Image (cartoon, rainbow, N blue to C red):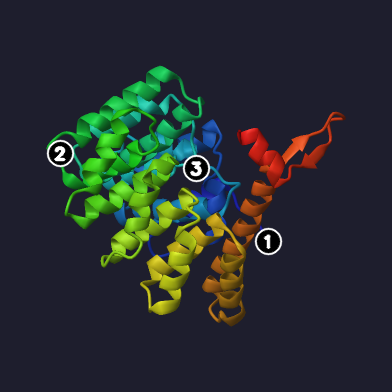
Amino acid sequence: MTELTFQSVLDHLLDSKKDIPQGHLSHYSDLDPKSLRLFLDMWGSVPQDRKLLLLDRLNAHLDEDTIVSYEDIGKSLLEDADAEVRARAIGLLSESDDPRLVDTLLGIFLNDTELAPRLKAANLLGEFVLLGELEELDEAHLHEIEEALISVIRSDENPVLRRQAVEAFGYSGREESVSILESAYEREDPLWVASALRAMGRSHDNRWNDSVLAKLLDVNPRIRYAAAEAAGELTIEEAAPVMLQMLEDEEEDDKVTMAAIWSLSQIGGDDARAYILSLLDNAEDNDITEFLEDALENLDFNEQLNKFDLLTLDEDGDLVELDEDELDYEDD
């Protein structure tokens, strides 16, 4: 068999009659300057639907494979003439921590003529807010992003964009976050409530525990879904029995069910483990089995992490486990 070259991959892309094979996707990863130039020189000749198909495939592959990186392509297409291409290009940057992207993303978020790329930019800007909270992004950039998000949240812009800005702002530790999240949560529109709940989960601030718990059994499945996600992010132990009962008592919406199960894997506990194992024993669908196995692995990871938090170093530098009396003493 002849070796597959990047040029042959590009030639295949130009042929709209052929599908894009899974095996071709990795060839678009980590392009060297020469290959990137080949790609960009050819891009204008690719039919529009073919462009979107490739970018959709690359975004999906990025979610599935932790080794590939399409950052070079994503950065190069941020100023593409087509809004859908720009939006998908931002998706390819979902794992980037390059601060040089901030100004470009802010420009798209605030000034792009189409909604799709603005929404994607808002979502990615939220990730940069998180980097700032972790002191992995300089304060000037963090402040610039937060001010932009606040300006849109408090504007009369498209409500979808404003809600996305609320969710992105959830990562922020700014004082304004409390009033912004409360205002969104108290609206009658379930879309705003769901965005507020999602932001609460991202905040990792347990001041929101009661607000999240109050929405776990809401009549609206979109709100239940967001509340279940937030309960897991905030590791609200009181939420576990509520979600277990909810899952046992009724035929729940599939998305809500998945969110609740994953949330249980974040919170942990013997009951959560038993429930996930029972579902795994009876699972017949391969995708469901894989999801439940991932949830079980996540539960194991979080429990091991919690055990590590209960360890300390003795005088010889060895790890020893603290008992509850010692923990109570240290709290005092």
Instruction: Name the residue tied to disc 3.
Output: 70
Report whether 176 appears left or right of 314: left
The kind of secondary structure element at disc 1 is loop
Q: Nearer the viewer, residue 286 or 80?
A: 286
Residue sitting at 53 percent across and 78 percent down? 285
Which mark is nearer the camera, 1 or 2?
2
Residue closest to the eye, 249 or 323: 323
Q: Find out whether the residues at labels 3 and 2 contact each other: C-beta distance under 8 Å.
A: no
Residue at x 33%, y 65% (from the top left corner): 217
**Vertical position of residue 82 compared to residue 256: above or below:** above
Quarter in which the N terminus is drawn: bottom right
Residue 74, disc: none
The mark lying in front, picked from 3 and 2, is 2
Q: Position of residue 234 (x, y in %)?
A: 46, 48
Distance of label 3 from label 2 (alpha carbons): 31 Å
Q: Residues within 10 Å of mark 2 (few under 14, many from 20)?
A: few
Q: Residue furthest left?
A: 156
Q: Earlier in the sequence, mark 1 or mark 2?
A: 1
Q: Position of residue 110 (x, y in %)?
A: 23, 31
Q: Is residue 194 left or right of residue 249?
A: left
Q: Residue at the spot x=39%, y=71% of the render?
A: 254
Type of the residue with mark 3:
Tyr
Disc 1: which residue: 1
